[in-house]
Image (spheres, helix red, strand yellow):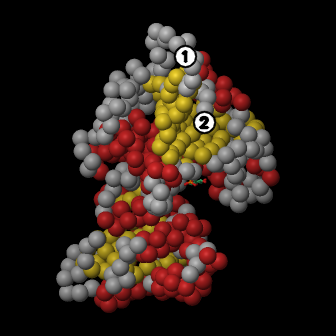
Amino acid sequence: LENGSLSIVVLGASGDLAKKKTFPALFHLYRQGFLPPDEVGIFGYARTKISNDELRTRLHGYLIKDKDASPEQLDVVSKFLNLIKYVSGSYDSEDGFLLLDKEISEHESLKNSAEGSSRRLFYFALPPSVYPSVSKMIKTCCVNKSDLGGWTRIVVEKPFGKDLQSAEQLSTQIGELFDEPQIYRIDHYLGKELVQNMLVLRFANRLFLPLWNRDNIANVQIVFREDFGTDGRGGYFDQYGIIRDIIQNHLLQVFCLVAMEKPVSLKPEHIRDEKVKVLQSVLPINYDEVVLGQYEGYRDDPTVPDNSNTPTFASVILRVHNERWEGVPFIIKAGKALGARKADIRVQFKDVPGDIFKCQNQGRNEFVIRLQPQEAMYMKLTVKQPGLEMSTVQSELDLSYIQRYQGVTIPEAYERLILDTIRGDQQHFVRRDELKASWEIFTPLLHRIDKGEFKSIPYKPGSRGPAEADELLEKAGYVQTHGY
Ligand code: BG6
């Protein structure tokens, strides 16, 4: 980290995201020494009129579970909480932001030595409707004004727009105020350990280089499942649906890393160039290759309209029109209120030509990357059944992180990504053209759904989703394997 003061402002400080994700991530960074107290000031900003102490009390329980905390741990928590100052104000008038600027400037004058620069990070834990006005207020009242250098950066969360047009409009509004290197569009899936591992896996292993293509791979699945519904978030969710909530951002980012070509180098621009290219190579979605679902009971939420058709489940096949992937279906699936909480990537290889073991009905080679829970990678292989007989069985080469990396704590996605924003590394953030390309893929389908031209099929909570999704998978050529 550079020298000089660092001011981190959490906008929307009293909201859910801030309490559950942003502040805990900052706390973990602080605890590990990444936010030195002689540089850092943390500011919470929101409309709610509460005192510093009230905010601190509210946050306490999210930072540490009291019952297992030692006095030393509690001491670290209170030191961290003491770094936080709360400023209340509206999102569209200057008064609050001028006050915020005053607080930040005071902090800077206390912390900066003669050669210190001023770094200001603004984290938008806010509804996107206020992004334009908040960006404007920051630009007008709160940017770094130090002659000694430093920077101003903003971190924006999804949902970033509702379709291509609204996303582009938002990008333009913010783009008029801040330059692209100042804008960090966060997608927390890019902070997950096994998502970050994807490029290493693909491009640092000779084994995969010749196999990762249409000659060898039959199909790829990227699947997200949750075993709970939209509990308490129905009002938000109903406006968006599962495609905007999970697929257009989180799963599409994972898709990019699985399908993109090798970047020229690890420079953020090189990586993002390749992600854009593969997104642009995706063919228009064929509506026969889409299944939408809605779990029974979703509409019981009083904030959800009785006749809502919003999908809480979707399975969509993406087809990539390039030399590597022509003909290989990428089945992207996400669902709420299913039987398990699990996210994984499944790469299924083709059958062995000229099979002499007649073992093919036992299943194909499949490489599975489990993003969560319990990070793991395993490769399904056919081996000889141990014993006197010459028979075959399917088994796994298994790399479970919990066993292989005992004692290693896997950082939280948000923790890692916030550190990147302080370090100025945009590799794991979504660039404007990438965002645009991802909306281009889904906007026509979303518009059809919004017009009610695509019906969500009801499914039972705790199930696998609509049976039609399994049929789609089978039609795409997926062969059920045994084992895991
Ligand atoms: C969020 C979605 O972006 O991701 C939620 O809005 C979802 O609906 C969450 O539950 C899933 O994140 P994770 O890290 O728990 O898989």
Residue at the disc numbered 1: 390
375, above or below 28, in the image: above
> Looking at this view, is 325 or 210 the one in front?
210
Query: How far across and down, in percent of the image, does residue 447 sit?
Result: 58, 39
Q: Is residue 280 left or right of residue 225?
A: left
Look at the numbered disc 1 and say if its residue's Cβ is closer than 8 Å to ligand 1: no
When asked about the image quadrant of residue 123, the answer is: bottom left
380, above or below 60, in the image: above
Looking at the picture, which amino acid does disc 1 mark? Answer: Met
Q: Which residue is pictured at 51% across the width and 31% down the height?
A: 380
Q: CA distance from mark 1 to mark 2?
A: 23 Å
Quadrant housing the C terminus? top right
- For mark 2, give the secondary structure: loop
Query: How far across and down, in percent of the image, does residue 467 sit?
Result: 71, 30
Quick check: which quadrant has ligand 1?
bottom right
| Residue 420 visible, this orientation | yes
79, above or below 20, in the image: below
Q: Which residue is pictured at 34% across the width and 31% down the height?
A: 207
Crowding around mark 2 (Cα neighbors within 10 Å: few <14, some 14 to 19, many 20+) is: few
> Looking at this view, is 236 or 214 the one in front?
214
> Looking at this view, is 269 or 160 the one in front?
269
Quadrant housing the N terminus? bottom left
Q: Which residue is pictured at 71% across the width and 34% down the height?
A: 466
Query: How far across and down, in percent of the image, does residue 210 sit?
Result: 33, 26
Residue at the disc numbered 2: 484
- Which label sits in the foreground, 1 or 2? 1
